[in-house]
Image (cartoon, rainbow, N blue to C red):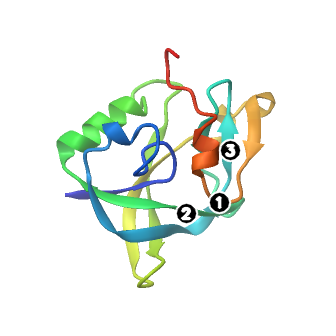
Amino acid sequence: MEKIFVFGTLKEGFPNFKHNHGKRFRAEFVTQKAFPLYLVGERYSPWLILTPGLGHAIKGQVFEVTDRVLQEMDALERVAQADGYHRVTTEVVCQQTGETVRVYVYGKPSLSLPVDHIKMELKGEYSLEHAQLYRSRGE
């Protein structure tokens, strides 16, 4: 089983959770390093930018996933597409226990972020309020 950190629409209770077939691991987590987090484009998609050290520590959830589930998430996040997310490893800290866990996370390189597409800079957390702005592909 692999562990994946989700910070946006794949979180429990959020718009794309129906595509998350992982098993929740512990409670709440936060990235050990800070990252920029934005709502981007007409769909208000949450983008974690792979520039560690800038932005804020990001709050999210960790799920244990099988290889099959990880492949499904890769497809949803368009990992094989030029404009898709990149799946990379990072470390997160459990807010309840202080335990550090190495996980996968989906993010985008800073060069793929057109500045004029940024709708909002988030301060470390994608909330249900932000999720109300989100539009799925095809909506």
C-alpha gap between disc 3 and disc 2? 13 Å
Q: In this view, does 60 lie to the left or right of 22?
A: right
Say which residue label 2 marks: 59
Comes first in the chain, label 1 or label 3: 3
Residue placed most toward the observer, 35 or 13: 13
Residue furthest out toward the bottom: 97
Disc 1 packing (10 Å; few <14; some 14–19; many ≥20): many
Residue at screen point 68% across, 44% down: 38
| Marks 1 and 3 close (CB-CB < 8 Å) | no
Task: Say what amino acid the circle numbered 2 marks.
Answer: Lys
Label 1 close to label 2 by CB (< 8 Å): yes
Q: Which of 32 and 127 is in front in this view?
A: 127
CA neighbours of label 3 inside 10 A, class few (<14), some (14 to 19), many (20+): many
Report how far apart the C-alphas of labels 1 and 2 lie in the structure.
6 Å
Badge 2: how crowded within 10 Å, few (<14), some, or many (20+)?
A: many
Q: Position of residue 10 (x, y in %)?
A: 42, 44
What distance separates the C-alpha of mark 1 from that of mark 3? 9 Å
The disc label shown at residue 124, or none: 1
**Relative vertical location of residue 21 with respect to residue 58 in this rendering, above or below:** above
Q: Where is residue 86 in the image (x, y as percent from the top left)?
A: 47, 40
Image side of residue 21 versus residue 76, left or right: left
Determine which residue is flagged by label 3. Answer: 38
